[in-house]
Image (cartoon, rainbow, N blue to C red):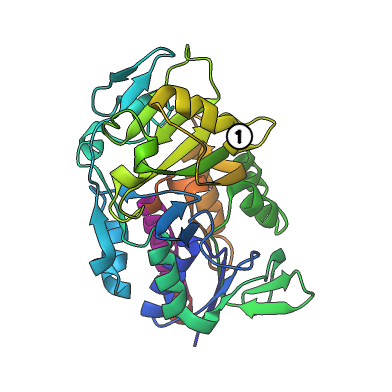
């Protein structure tokens, strides 16, 4: 059986591995962290569902929903409850037109038509899908196995791992951040891969705060608010998590998720006073959970698509290798699924062609 190494065990890599196994190949997922899932990180505590990464995906995009059907968790899909958002001006909350919140946050890649159809998620949080994928793939997902180098070999590629061991594979899929993929590809002589360093990953700091319902003195309308540039605070936006999707907090409780401007200080201690002023919160939060991503959401340069297309043309000269993920094909969760599966199909086609030469 043909062995394909998938470097990276986030949603992109897991989707790629799933597609490879469906195509009859032996997939081996190499993940440097101790758990699969990447930036999809869900914690469940005392009836709360707390997201450390994305909390949902565009309902208009079918890729993730199709994957959920295939791995048996489509019954876990949930629809967005509340709609609409507000702008915090520094003095009051004002309702925003549909889609305006994304624009204010600098998210311009999503079409208005897609935004109008809302978002979906999973009953137990976004990790429902990555946990299901990892469980279905089983022992082929190797965590705590980072990749230090990739080199061509007689059979395809020789992959060096952090522990000193080596893996041989006929093909490779790089489902990792752009700057890591660039380093590995330059190491095998693909100099044009240096242009992936143009992808800038902005830092992300979020903090989830739990309250009793009676601590929230004002009415929460819609899914949350975005802070205007004149507001002068550190809270850039806030999602009313327990109001956006079902099951995020027990009855009688409220879960908020604030997005902060990176800076010094404890995120919870910084966020709570500001949220208390904006939303009329009484007393301290029951608990706080902060997540910090030094390199969070990628942003592309104007010539990004051109650079990726040229890189992919160069990769056709090598034994089967493909790139995938948010660093190359779009930042949404569904985009990552689509990218990973297409990378797997590309490698499978090339393997099939080589076997018939």
Secondary structure, mark 1, is helix
In the rendered image, residue 323, in percent from the top left (x then y), is placed at 52, 56
- The answer to whether residue 199 of the structure is visible from this angle is no
In the rendered image, residue 329, in percent from the top left (x then y), is placed at 44, 47
* Up-down relation of residue 200 to residue 234 (above or below): below
- The answer to whether residue 290 of the structure is visible from this angle is yes
Q: Residue at x 30, y 67 (%)?
A: 68
Q: Which residue is mark 1?
A: 269
Q: Residue at x 35, y 21 (%)?
A: 87
Q: Residue at x 67, y 78 (%)?
A: 167
Q: Residue furthest bottom?
A: 1
Quadrant housing residue 103: top left
In the image, taking residue 75 as reference, residue 150 lies left or right, namely: right
In the rendered image, residue 134, in percent from the top left (x then y), is placed at 47, 74
* Up-down relation of residue 270 to residue 240 (above or below): above
Q: Nearer the viewer, residue 43 or 314?
A: 43
Q: Which residues are magenta?
A: 334-351
Q: Badge 1: few (under 14), some or many (20 or more) residues near its Cα, within 10 Å?
A: few
In the rendered image, residue 42, in percent from the top left (x then y), is placed at 47, 58
> Does the magenta stretch mainly form a helix, a strand or a loop?
helix
Quadrant housing residue 264: top right
In the image, taking residue 295 as reference, residue 310 lies left or right, namely: left
């Amino acid at each position: 059986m043909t062995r394909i190494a998938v470097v990276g065990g986030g949603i992109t890599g897991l989707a790629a591995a799933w597609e490879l196994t469906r195509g009859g190949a032996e997939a081996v997922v190499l993940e440097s962290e101790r758990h699969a899932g990447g930036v999809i990180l869900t914690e469940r505590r005392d009836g709360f569902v707390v997201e450390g990464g994305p909390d949902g995906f565009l309902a208009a995009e079918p890729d993730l929903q199709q994957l959920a059907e295939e791995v048996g968790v489509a019954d876990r899909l949930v629809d967005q409850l509340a709609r609409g958002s507000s702008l915090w001006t520094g003095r009051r909350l004002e309702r925003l037109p549909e889609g305006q919140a994304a624009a204010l946050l600098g998210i311009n890649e999503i079409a208005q038509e897609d935004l109008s159809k809302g978002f979906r998620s999973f009953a137990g949080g976004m990790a429902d899908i990555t946990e299901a994928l990892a469980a279905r793939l089983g022992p082929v997902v190797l965590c705590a196995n980072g990749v230090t180098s990739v080199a061509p070999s007689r059979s395809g590629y020789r992959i060096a791992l952090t522990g000193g061991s080596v893996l041989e594979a006929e093909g490779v899929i790089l489902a990792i951040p752009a700057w890591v993929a660039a380093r590995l590809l330059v190491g095998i002589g693909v100099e044009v891969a240096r242009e992936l360093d143009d992808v800038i990953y902005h830092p992300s700091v979020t903090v989830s705060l739990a309250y009793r319902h009676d601590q929230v003195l004002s009415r929460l309308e819609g899914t949350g608010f975005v802070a205007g540039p004149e507001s002068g605070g550190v809270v850039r936006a806030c999602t009313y998590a327990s109001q956006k999707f079902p099951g995020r907090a027990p009855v009688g409780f409220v879960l908020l998720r604030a997005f902060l401007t990176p800076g010094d200080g404890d995120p919870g201690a910084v966020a709570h006073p500001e949220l208390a002023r904006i939303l009329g919160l009484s007393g301290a939060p029951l608990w706080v959970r902060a997540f910090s991503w030094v390199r969070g959401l990628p942003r592309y340069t104007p010539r990004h698509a051109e650079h990726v297309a040229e890189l992919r043309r160069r990769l056709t000269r090598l034994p089967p290798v493909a790139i995938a993920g948010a660093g190359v094909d779009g930042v949404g969760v569904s985009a990552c699924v689509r990218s990973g599966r297409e990378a797997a199909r590309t490698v499978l086609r090339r393997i099939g062609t080589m076997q018939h030469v």
